[in-house]
Image: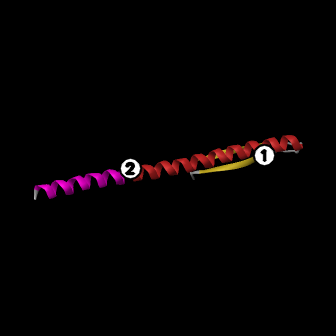
Amino acid sequence: MIEIFITISISVLLSAAMILYNRTGERQIALFKDQARVINLILRAKSLALQTYTEGSAACGYGVHFDSAIGAAILFKDQAAD
C-alpha cells in the first residue's frame, strides 16, 4: 500500500512539473513569434525607406509605431511637407 502511494505521488509530481514546463514553453513560443513579427516590420520599414531613397520619391521615410493599448505594431509612411 505504501509503495502504491509513493508511486502515485511521484507520478503526480512529475505530471505537475511537465504541465508547468509546457506552459512556460508556450509563453516562450508566443514571445518568439512576437519578436519575429517586430523584427520583420522594422526590416520592412528599412527596406521601404531605402527603396524610396533610390527612387527619389516624395516620401520622407517609414517607421514602426508600437501601440501598447491595443497590442499592435503599425508600419507607417511619413510624407514630405510639400
The magenta segment is 2-21
Displayed quadrant of residue 65: top right
* Spot occupied by residue 44 in the image (x, y as percentages of width and height): 72, 47
The amino acid beneath tag 2 is Tyr
Looking at the rendering, in which quadrant would you find the N terminus?
A: bottom left
Which residue is pictured at 11% across the width and 55% down the height?
2
Q: Viewed as shown, does residue 57 lie left or right of 12?
A: right
Q: Residue furthest front?
A: 3
The answer to which of marks 2 and 1 sits earlier in the sequence is 2
Residue 48 included in the magenta stretch of the image? no
Q: Which residue is mark 2?
A: 21
Q: Viewed as shown, does residue 3 lie left or right of 15?
A: left
Which residue is pictured at 23% across the width and 52% down the height?
10
Q: Judging from the image, what secondary structure is the residue with disc 1 in?
A: helix
Main SS category, magenta section: helix
The amino acid beneath tag 1 is Leu
Which residue is pictured at 87% across the width and 41% down the height?
54
Visible residue check, residue 62: no
Q: Which residue is mark 1?
A: 48
Looking at the rendering, in which quadrant would you find the C terminus?
A: top right
